[in-house]
Image (cartoon, grey):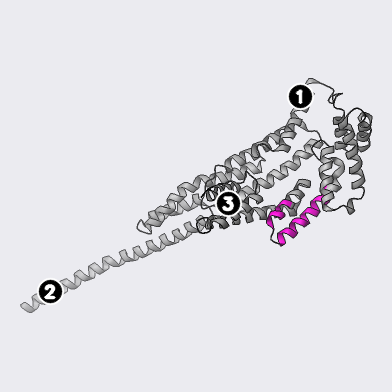
Amino acid sequence: MKVVVAVLLGLFVMVFITRVIGNLKPRMSGDVAGTSDAAGLFAEAKALIRQGKWAAAKAKLEAVREEDDDYEPRQIENYLKVAEEELPNEERFAAITDALEKNELSRAKSVLGQVKTTTQDKALSAAKDALAQRIEARRAEARTLLSSQQWEPLLALSTDLLGAMPGDRDASEWKQQAEQAIARGKKGPTKVISADTPWLEAQQRFKSGDVSGARSLAKACSKKYAKCRDFQNGLDVFEAKTARLEALSDGDLLLMFKLDRELAGGTSSQTSQQLRARVAERYFLKASSAKTSGSWVKALEYAGVALDADPQHAGSKALVVEGRSKATELYLRGYQLRETDPPEAVRLFKEVLTMTLPTDENHIKARGFIERLEAR
């Protein structure tokens, strides 16, 4: 009897163990599958984060939670917090791209100023470069509109440029000229040049390419007005120098480039195309040489001269973009050394100042660090 009871008890224990194991196996298999799916989704989310695609990354991170809420909970939570901060920036970058495609420089600059990011520095730098390139292209369009006296489009363009570059001298002048021309058109024909300022008409003639007409007007008023005499003397120098354009030194080329603008009343004349092309090419070569020798400050200075002469010069535009990247690199080095080697950090920050415009973000931050470090 005891033997029978023992056998029955043994069978009962075996059945119980078999059932427990049977219940456990599917559950363990399901946990492994769930973990595997969560890991895959997490890897996809991180790949999207590296691309700056935070909206898509957030969706993947939330999917990880739904799949397995015990999978890397701290990392998921941290990434989701960053996503909430970066999603507005992703929308801003899209808005900047849209504004640039529509040539709305003022809107692009305004939205760019709202971007505050610690993870999308490359996208921020690319947006700044795209805005700078579009500004240069629009400046060239403004000059074309000015030369063809298309005042309404010039007014709209110059107003937009001033929104992107407050206080810009050229844009301010273009806007003023457009407003005055439009006002004259509404009032009807009026005498543009006052009898007390006859040299202004000579400037307009020279600017439009009528050199002989400009000379005649200047000669006619030279006895009475010193500015007419100055204009006539300047015109003599300009014609004598540019007659041997190929032989001019870099310094003389730059002087003639500036003189051309003075004679034309502030903007380049239609007769100076060859001069401007030569200035752009020669100073681009100087910029390239300075870059090769490691003198980025000089390189950017020369490239700026080349772009002033020819805003569409491809080589100079590319060098300026590279220079901005170099300025960012110098700023980051200075930032890293600000505590361990303040004098070297100040030197680097000062170099950043010489390579950037006062409105540039790196320029502003570098100046702030210089003031704080030198005040210690």
Nearer-N-terminus badge (1/2) = 2
Q: How crowded is the residue under tag 1: few (<14 C-alpha within 10 Å), some, or many (20+)? A: few
Label 3: state its secondary structure.
Answer: helix
**Is 143 drawn above or below residue 281 in the view shown?**
above
Q: How crowded is the residue under tag 2: few (<14 C-alpha within 10 Å), some, or many (20+)? A: few
Q: Nearer the viewer, mark 3 or mark 2?
A: 3
Residue 15 is left or right of residue 110, and the answer is left
**Is 308 drawn above or below residue 225 in the view shown?**
below
CB within 8 Å, label 1 to label 2: no
In reply to whether residue 148 is colored magenta, the answer given is no
The residue that disc 1 covers is 183
Report the residue at 57% width, 42% height from top: 113
Q: In the orientation shown, which residue stands out farthest toward the front?
A: 376
The residue that disc 3 covers is 123
Residue 117 drawn at (x, y percent): 52, 49
Q: CA distance from mark 3 to mark 2?
A: 75 Å
Report the residue at 85% width, 53% height from top: 249
Q: Amino acid at mark 2?
A: Leu
- How many labels, in total? 3
**Is 32 drawn above or below residue 243 in the view shown?**
below
The residue that disc 2 covers is 8
Residue 29 is left or right of residue 14, and the answer is right
Q: Amino acid at mark 3?
A: Ala
Report the residue at 27% width, 68% height from top: 22
Nearer-N-terminus badge (1/3) = 3
Residue 124 drawn at (x, y percent): 58, 49
Magenta-highlighted residues: 276-301
Residue 292 drawn at (x, y percent): 72, 62
